[in-house]
Image (cartoon, rainbow, N blue to C red):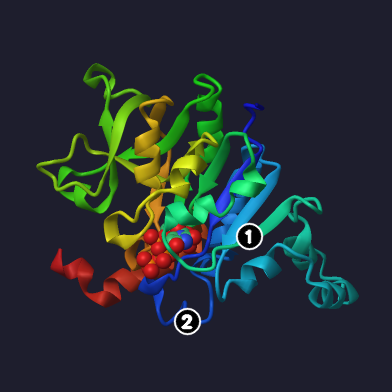
């Protein structure tokens, strides 16, 4: 079995109800952060990590994602006719080679675990990555690339992107049960189990799983018979938890800042942070933000 991480799964079959009405007819993953859709950042992160095969697990009303990863001949012809070279490059220069993008349908949004399971035939028998586009990580070295490098030190394991969270927030996340508390502070932390959304007094740690995974293909066998868990959904965390007995599982504390773009506040914060990370608009952004802050009256209240 090849140990190189060549394939990524992007589960994009969710309903995105927290963004209604924006997501009534547009996929959540196509919401823009500055000038690129969420899914485009996820794709770039996968490319930077050396991924060769990009698998999108889609659902109803997700066609704009298919179109985004294709040529837009009409638009490209018009731009070319007008000699708009910059715009032309931004439309299509980044497209991956033909044949490296696949779409598989999750007919019902039964949960993240179910979405990943829908990709089993395309993944086959090799380790693979999963990126949730609505978890953005702003980092010097892209998060998945960091994880692929960490994987090279523990091949054959599962690796989950993790971050430290405030103790009172454990009820909103999947939490890692750390095997050896002496190593609790290291970047690569071995897990003896995972707990989905534990109350703070029941949480085995404050290390929370984010939307970045490197998984062994055996997860598909478990997902295939996985019963619905938290929220009535087939949870990926539950299946990985079952695997920890046989397959070493690690949390990887990535370098960077994670924005939870599955919710309104994280999404707006990401827009501000990513705009401020763009040198060509940073100065004007700061001026505008200062004005907004003043006008809102928040500054005086502080
Ligand atoms: P979320 O938990 O954010 O769910 O999914 P959601 O349906 O997208 O959004 P809300 O809660 O209704 O606002 C995390 C990721 O998993 C995918 C989503 O598309 C998102 O990228 N997902 C979730 C699936 O692909 N299928 C599912 O059945 C559930």
Question: In screen coordinates, is 286 left or right of 199?
Answer: right
Q: Quadrant of ligand 1?
A: bottom left
In the image, what residue occupies the spot 59% across and 51% down?
A: 119
In the image, what residue occupies the spot 66% across and 27% down?
A: 2
Question: Mark 2 vs mark 1: which is more N-terminal?
Answer: 2
Asked if 154 appears above or below 37 in the picture, the reply is above
Mark 1 burial class by Cα count in 10 Å: few <14, some 14-19, many 20+: some
Return the residue at label 1. 104
Name the one closer to the observer, 229 or 278.
Answer: 229
Secondary structure of residue under mark 2: loop
Quadrant housing the N terminus: top right
Name the one closer to the observer, 18 or 164.
Answer: 18
Name the one closer to the observer, 167 or 176.
Answer: 176
Question: In screen coordinates, is 4 left or right of 110?
Answer: right
Q: Position of residue 14 (x, y in %)?
A: 46, 66
The CA span between labels 2 and 1 is: 21 Å
Asked if 265 appears above or below 254 in the picture, the reply is below
Q: Position of residue 300 (x, y in %)?
A: 17, 69
Return the residue at label 2. 24
Q: Position of residue 260 (x, y in %)?
A: 38, 56
Asked if 247 appears above or below 68 in the picture, the reply is above
Q: Can residue 66 be seen in the rendering of this structure?
A: yes
In the image, what residue occupies the spot 82% across and 74% down?
A: 79
Q: Position of residue 224 (x, y in %)?
A: 47, 48
Residue 46 is marked as none
Mark 2 burial class by Cα count in 10 Å: few <14, some 14-19, many 20+: few
Quadrant housing the C terminus: bottom left
Name the front one of labels 2 and 1: 1
Q: Can residue 273 be seen in the rendering of this structure?
A: no
């Amino acid at each position: 079995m090849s140990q190189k991480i060549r394939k990524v799964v992007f589960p994009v079959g969710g309903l995105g109800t927290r963004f209604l009405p924006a997501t009534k007819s547009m996929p959540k993953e196509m919401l823009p952060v500055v000038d690129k859709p969420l899914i485009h950042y996820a794709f770039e992160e996968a490319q930077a990590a050396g991924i060769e095969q990009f698998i999108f697990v889609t659902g109803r009303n997700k066609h704009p994602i298919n179109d985004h990863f294709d040529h837009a001949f009409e638009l490209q012809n018009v731009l070319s006719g007008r000699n708009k070279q910059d715009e032309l490059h931004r439309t299509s220069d980044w497209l991956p080679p033909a044949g490296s993008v696949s779409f598989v349908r999750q007919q019902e949004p039964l949960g993240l675990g179910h979405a990943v399971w829908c990709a089993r035939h395309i993944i086959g028998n090799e380790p693979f990555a999963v990126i949730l586009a609505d978890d953005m990580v702003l980092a010097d070295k892209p998060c998945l690339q960091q994880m692929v490098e960490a994987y090279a030190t523990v091949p054959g394991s599962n690796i989950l992107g993790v971050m430290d969270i405030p103790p009172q927030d454990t009820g909103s996340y999947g939490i890692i049960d750390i095997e050896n508390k002496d190593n609790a502070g290291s970047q690569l932390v071995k897990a003896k189990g995972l707990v989905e959304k534990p109350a703070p007094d029941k949480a085995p740690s404050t290390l929370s799983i984010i939307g970045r995974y490197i998984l062994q293909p055996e997860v598909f066998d478990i997902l295939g018979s996985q019963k619905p868990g938290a929220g009535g959904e087939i949870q990926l965390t539950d299946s990985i938890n079952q695997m920890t007995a046989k397959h070493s599982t690690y949390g990887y504390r990535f370098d960077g800042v994670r924005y939870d773009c599955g919710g309104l506040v994280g999404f707006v914060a990401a827009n501000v942070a990513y705009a401020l990370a763009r040198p060509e608009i940073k100065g004007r952004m700061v001026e505008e933000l200062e004005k907004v802050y003043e006008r809102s009256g928040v500054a005086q209240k502080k």
